[in-house]
């Protein structure tokens, strides 16, 4: 598709909203710069090991709470035992603004307080299998931001990893929100398109995906 032609918003399922180009270039650069800082620690960017012994192809760093399959903790006991970096208020505010733009202003959007962010880096070969985000104790919506190379994002149903699902191309700056009836829909990334990102974001290659969530946990 011609990059000069705006892609309209879409709602692939009830409670799921795709807003293409939601992040401006300056905001993308700010997030890329921040992600580089967070990737160095206190808990560094790493490949997550699954209980089965396999290793995820994406690399992940967390803010607020540390995620590992299938639980959250304040300290990364599976990595180096350090407490993860705090989730900054400016990033939580970005999440509230995203929710308001996706769903409209309401008490729900104004009171949205994400307390964790999972930041995934995809190289040209990384994928994410179909899964549900269900380790949180809250059913508040998930806010997903994409920067860098485009990908095929597969958004499915709440019952199984199979059909029906919708394949959506997510580009740099895109916002995807899923909550309500779609909060526990299976989803994944089937393909990354190398070389489709804009170097002006600060990323020479690869894709960053930031997901903001409410864990519903307390210390």
Image: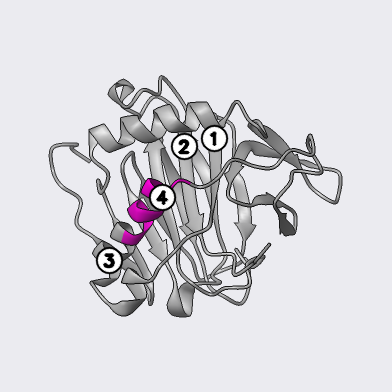
* Residues marked 3 and 1 touching at CB (< 8 Å): no
Task: Identify which residue, 191 or 63, lies in the foreground.
Answer: 63
Of callouts 2 and 4, the N-terminal one = 4
Looking at the image, is mark 2 or mark 3 nearer the viewer?
Answer: 3
Which residue sits at x=25%, y=49%?
Answer: 22
Mark sitting on residue 89: 4
Which-is-in-front pick, marks 1 and 4? 4
Instruction: Give the secondary structure at mark 3.
Output: helix
From the top left corner, tell me how far across and down residue 151 is, in percent: 44, 42
Q: Earlier in the sequence, mark 2 or mark 3?
A: 3
Between marks 3 and 1 in the image, the one whose residue lies nearer the viewer: 3
For label 2, the residue is 208
Say which quarter of the image contains residue 162. Answer: bottom right
Distance, label 3 to label 1, CA atoms, is 26 Å
The x, y position of residue 172, in whole percent, is: 33, 38
Compared across the picture, whether 68 is left or right of 173 comes to right
User: Pointer 3: what residue?
Assistant: 100
Q: Mark 1 — residue? A: 121
* Image quarter of the C terminus: bottom right
Choose the circle earlier in sequence order: 3 or 1.
3
Mark 4 and mark 3: span between their CA atoms? Answer: 17 Å
Q: Main secondary structure of the magenta part?
A: helix
Residue nearest the viewer, comparing 78 with 194: 78
Which one is closest to the eye, mark 4 or mark 3? Answer: 4
What residue do we see at 32% from left, 29% from top? 29
Mark earlier in primary sequence (4, 3)? 4
Q: Residue at x 36, y 22 (%)?
A: 202
Mark 3 Cα within 10 Å, few/some/many (few <14, many 20+)? Answer: some
In the drawing, does residue 171 fall left or right of residue 73? Answer: left
Asked if marks 1 and 2 touch (Cβ < 8 Å), the reply is yes
Chain part drawn in magenta: 88-96
């Amino acid at each position: 598709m011609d990059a000069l032609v705006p892609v309209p918003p879409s709602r692939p399922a009830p409670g799921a909203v795709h807003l293409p180009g939601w992040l401006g270039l300056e905001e993308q650069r700010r997030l890329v710069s921040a992600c580089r800082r967070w990737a160095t620690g206190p808990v560094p960017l790493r490949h997550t090991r699954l209980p089965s012994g396999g290793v995820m192809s994406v690399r992940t760093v967390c803010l607020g709470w540390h995620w590992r399959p299938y639980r959250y903790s304040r300290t990364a006991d599976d990595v180096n035992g350090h407490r993860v970096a705090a989730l900054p208020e400016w990033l939580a505010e970005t999440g509230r603004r995203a929710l308001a733009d996706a769903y409209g202003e309401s008490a729900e959007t104004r009171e949205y307080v994400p307390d964790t962010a999972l930041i995934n880096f995809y190289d040209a070969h990384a994928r994410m299998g179909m899964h549900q985000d269900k380790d949180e104790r809250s059913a508040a919506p998930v806010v997903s931001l994409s920067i860098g190379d485009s990908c095929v994002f597969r958004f499915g149903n709440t019952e199984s990893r199979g059909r029906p699902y919708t394949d959506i191309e997510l580009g740099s700056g895109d916002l995807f929100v899923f909550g309500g009836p779609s909060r526990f829909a299976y989803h994944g990334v089937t393909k990354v398109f190398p070389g489709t990102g804009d170097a002006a974001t600060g990323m020479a290659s690869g894709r960053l995906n930031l997901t903001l969530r409410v864990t519903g946990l307390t210390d």
